Image (tube, rainbow, N blue to C red):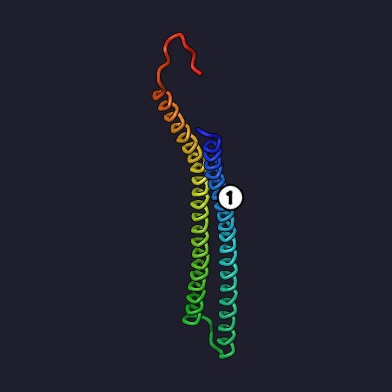
Amino acid sequence: MTTVEIALAALSAASTVAQGVAANNTARAQAQAMRQNADIIRQRAAVEEDKYRRQTSKLLGRQRALFANAGVNLDGSPLLAQEETAANAELEALTMRHTGDLEAANQLNQAMLTRLKGRTALVSGFTGAGESLLGSYVSYDREQKRLTQSKPATPSGEKER
């Protein structure tokens, strides 16, 4: 194996390792961004949930004021309507939170998978480099054995030149 072949094998191995390291670094950055997105999704869902509750509270207040202004007693049907509106609003607010939690969990799962792909690429880079170097050594060893076997035998007592 010539010096150039050795250098090419080493360069190929180094390139394979560098690709694995780069893929791992990229995956790490992408996973971090996904985790940040999960936090943002949760925060946005909490804001929407709070906003919806405030709107519903204002609506219920306006309804009570209208009922009072019209001289309607809040017993019976008007009270039941208010309670039903409040219950439906709470269910909607909780649904908003749950939807945000699901979206955030999806982002976290994607982050975990991306991170795993990065680690796999890193290991693959080192494995590929080892395979490249080992393959080069095997080729070199075969060539040396072939050359040794093809040399004519020297008579005993004489030294090789």
Looking at the image, which residue is at 60% across and 79% down?
58
Residue 23 screen position, x and y as percent: 54, 50
Give the amino acid type for the residue marked by disc 1 in the picture: Asn
Residue 13 coordinates in the image, percent (x, y):
53, 40
- Viewer-proximal residue, 66 or 89? 89
* Residue furthest bottom as drawn: 70
Of residue 103 and residue 73, the one placed in the foreground of this image is 103
Q: Position of residue 7 (x, y in %)?
A: 56, 38
Q: Residue at x 42, y 25 (%)?
A: 145
Q: Which residue is at a point 52% across and 58% down the rendered structure image?
A: 107
| Vertical order, 6 against 50 (above or below) | above
Please tell me whether mark 1 sits on a helix, a strand or a loop: helix
* Quarter-of-image position of residue 151: top left
11 to 88, vertically: above or below: above
Give how far across and how far down residue 78 sits, in percent: 49, 82
In this rendering, the answer to whether 110 lies above or below 18 is below
Tally of numbered discs: 1
Return the residue nearer the eye: 127 or 34.
Answer: 127
Q: Nearer the viewer, residue 22 or 112?
A: 22
Residue under label 1: 25
Above or below 90: residue 14: above
**Which residue shows up at 55% across the image and 86% down it?**
67
Circle 1 residues within 10 Å: few <14, some 14–19, many ≥20:
some
Residue at the extreme top? 157
